[in-house]
Image (tube, rainbow, N blue to C red):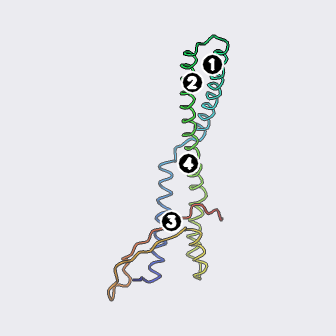
Amino acid sequence: VSSPIELVEKELLKSIGGWLNLAAVNTETIYGNIDNGVNKKAIDSLENELKTISEQINKTYDLLEQGIYTTEMFTERNKLLSSRQAEIEGKITELKNKLKEHISVTELKTNIIPRMQRLIRQYQTLPDAESKNSILKELLIKATYEKTVKNNKGTVDRNNFTIEIFPNLLSSKK
């Protein structure tokens, strides 16, 4: 079961354009207000606190060796400090992941989406299938076409098929 290539091409471009519009709006809505400076300062602050806790843990060993701490006091203090250390390490990891996520969203907004929009405009000016195919390969990892209903006579131009696109977000060609 097939469809006219012009109809498939039109729907493919429509899907890519829809994805680009949705990606541009969603990244701005979801991630537009994240402040990297605040995250970086928080990470620095937590890393300083982590150094302090590490020094405190080392001091508990010194106090135990000097006989100032009993074994019970040492164990209790060490457990408390180790727990705090693990908590801070978790927060640092979480903030670093948020920072990475925002950087990739920034990359999407500033480089990937504009590049894809430029390629779509360029695609529409190309005269031959080979050049158009090259652009599609740069835009997409793959696209799936599924049609299970045969067109009856006189309904060839009906798009009773689905196209699913998988945008190429990793390509860095300019």
3D distance between C-alphas at marks 3 and 1 = 55 Å
Secondary structure category for the residue under label 3? strand
Residue 170: percent from left, percent from top: 60, 61
| CA distance for labels 4 and 1 | 38 Å
Q: Tag 2: residue type?
A: Leu
In the rendered view of the protein, which quadrant contains the C terminus? bottom right
The residue tagged 3 is: 166
User: How many numbered circles are shown?
Assistant: 4
Say which amino acid is labelled 1: Thr
Q: Are marks 2 and 1 in contact (CB under 8 Å)?
A: yes
In the image, what residue type sits under mark 4? Glu
Q: Nearer the viewer, mark 3 or mark 1?
A: 1
Q: CA distance from mark 4 to mark 3?
A: 20 Å
Q: Earlier in the sequence, mark 2 or mark 1?
A: 1
The foreground one among 165 and 135 is 165
Residue placed under numbered mark 2 in the picture: 81
**Which picture quadrant has residue 72?**
top right
Q: Residue type at mark 3: give it.
A: Phe
At mark 2, the secondary structure is helix
Q: Earlier in the sequence, mark 3 or mark 1?
A: 1
Q: Residue at x 56, y 52 (%)?
A: 105
Q: Is residue 45 left or right of residue 160?
A: right
Q: Identify the residue at image location x=57%, y=22%.
A: 78
- Pointer 1: residues within 10 angstroms few (<14), some, or many (20+)? some
Which residue lies under the disc numbered 4?
101
Does 90 appear above or below 20? above
Expressed as whole percent of the image width and height from the top left, the position of residue 132 reads 58, 77
Q: Nearer the viewer, mark 2 or mark 1?
A: 1
